[in-house]
Amino acid sequence: TARQLLQTDSGGSGVEFTSNVDVPGTLDVTGAVTLDSTLATTGLISANGKISFPLGTAAAPSIYFGGDTNTGVFSPAGDTVAITTAGAQRVTFDSSGRVGIGNTAMSGFTGNSSDNLVVGSGSGGEGITVYSATNNQGSITFADGTSGNAAYRGAVEYSHTLDAIQFRT
């Protein structure tokens, strides 16, 4: 049983498992948990405190899914989180709240306040698709408020019903 495998660590301040432990129910821990190896679970891991992971890399993210060890989440720099697939950094969230899709240098586009979302790497054809119903429209909207017509002061809109692009102000 788990109780038989427990030993007090050499400093007397914690508990050390000296072998694999199978806990069929809930394991409650009130102090810190340090893993020197792998934690495997088929269920839910729940924490009321903090969980710390190593920074990781695009090729070896610190949080990954199943056996797909090059797809997941990592931190490429301080106050930055990234998502990687197939070992390549795909989406980046930086400390200013900027998002890069296929781009990690959003701060390079600050000249005209167009750095909140940067799409593309600049090394080939890139784009954004607005996918909408055949009897509706797709829009890029400009707002200077959150209510009334301030929420849609201007727009570039494509009407699928009319098969026409419209610029609205």
Image: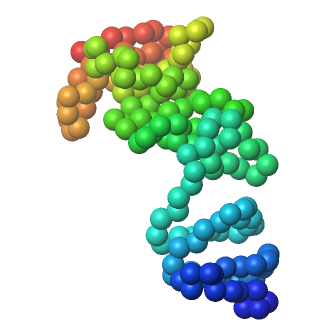
In the image, residue 84 sits, relative to residue 12, either above or below, namely above
Q: Position of residue 112 (x, y in %)?
A: 28, 14
Q: Position of residue 110 (x, y in %)?
A: 31, 18
Pick the front one: 149 or 130: 130
Pick the front one: 152 or 41: 41
Pick the front one: 122 or 151: 122
- Could you tell me which residue is drawn at 74 percent across and 81 percent down? 23
- Could you tell me which residue is drawn at 36 percent across and 16 percent down? 109
In the image, residue 119 sits, relative to residue 21, either above or below, namely above
| Quadrant location, the C terminus | top left
In the image, residue 45 sits, relative to residue 156, either above or below, namely below
Q: Is residue 151 left or right of residue 132?
A: left
| Quadrant location, the N terminus | bottom right
Q: Position of residue 135 (x, y in %)?
A: 52, 24
Q: Is residue 97 left or right of residue 102?
A: left
Image quadrant where residue 86 sits: top right
- Could you tell me which residue is drawn at 47 percent across and 37 percent down? 77
Q: Is residue 132 left or right of residue 165?
A: right
- Could you tell me which residue is drawn at 63 percent across and 50 percent down? 63
Image quadrant where residue 127 sits: top right
Q: Is residue 135 visible?
A: no
Image quadrant where residue 118 sits: top left
Q: Position of residue 160 (x, y in %)?
A: 51, 17
Q: Is residue 92 visible?
A: yes
